[in-house]
Image (cartoon, grey):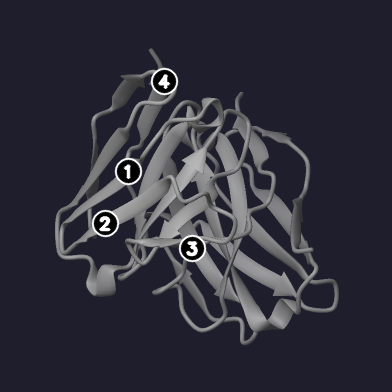
Amino acid sequence: EIVLTQSPGTLSLSPGERATLSCRASQTVSSSYLAWYQQKPGQAPRLLIYGASSRATGIPDRFSGSGSGTDFTLTISRLEPEDFAVYYCQQYGSSPLTFGGGTKVEIK
Amino acid sequence: QVQLVQSGAEVKKPGASVKVSCKASGYTFITYGISWMRQAPGQGLEWMGWISAYNGNTNYAQKLQGRVTMTTDTSTSTAYLELRSLRSDDTAVYYCARAPWTSIVGATFDYWGQGTLVTVSS
């Protein structure tokens, strides 16, 4: 099973600032099958990024993903008020699918 | 528009079973699969398994093997999750999500249900 470790656990930033979130895998993620989701309280997760760097439909271009192998990054170039949420990475290159523990982006 | 609508909240006693439904609309049900995830209070997401609506193939998380069954009813475009021998640590919000019909490998989840809270308490 591929274990995904996200860091930091919490990121305290102000609107307009840049957010950089990390996701490290215990083994190589096959075919860069790494996705990022955003979750707000009381809501289901929303797909942001798939294939490590492709934005899902309707996702603003301030969200970008990068990385390969075992190290992946989600960057939010300029935080908008609606971006404060929890973010999860997920690998889907091998079964069982696994999620990281999440990074909470909170308002400073 | 694609929608996945789940059944309502459940309260169960330890040792009981629960069956959660997920009704799909806005797409051709048998051309996709359904995956189930859960999220314990204040915790992260856990993948539980997948079923192909096309051919009924399943892939369950090993830790749930023997306690979980996923089924579909193609006549009503509904997927079901049954979890047996419930324990207090099964208390969670359970989500269904649309997945490919072929395999869970390569699957991202673009559409999710609203979630169903299952509480296990004596």
User: To which residue does mark 3 refer?
Assistant: B49
* Alpha-carbon span between mark 4 and mark 2: 22 Å
Secondary structure at badge 3 equals strand
* Alpha-carbon span between mark 1 and mark 3: 29 Å
Q: Chain of mark 2?
A: A
User: To which residue does mark 2 refer?
Assistant: A66
Q: Nearer the viewer, mark 4 or mark 2?
A: 2
Query: Upstream in the sequence, badge 4 or badge 1?
Result: 1
User: To which residue does mark 4 refer?
Assistant: A106
Asked if both marks, 4 and 2, belong to the same chain, the answer given is: yes
* Alpha-carbon span between mark 2 and mark 1: 8 Å
Label 3 amino acid? Gly
Which of the labelled discs sits on residue A75, or is there none? 1
* Alpha-carbon span between mark 3 and mark 4: 31 Å
| Spot occupied by residue B23 in the image (x, y as percentages of width and height) | 78, 61
Secondary structure at badge 2 equals strand
Front-most of residues A1 and B31: B31
Label 1 amino acid? Thr
Label 4 amino acid? Glu
Pointers 2 and 1 in contact (C-beta within 8 Å):
yes
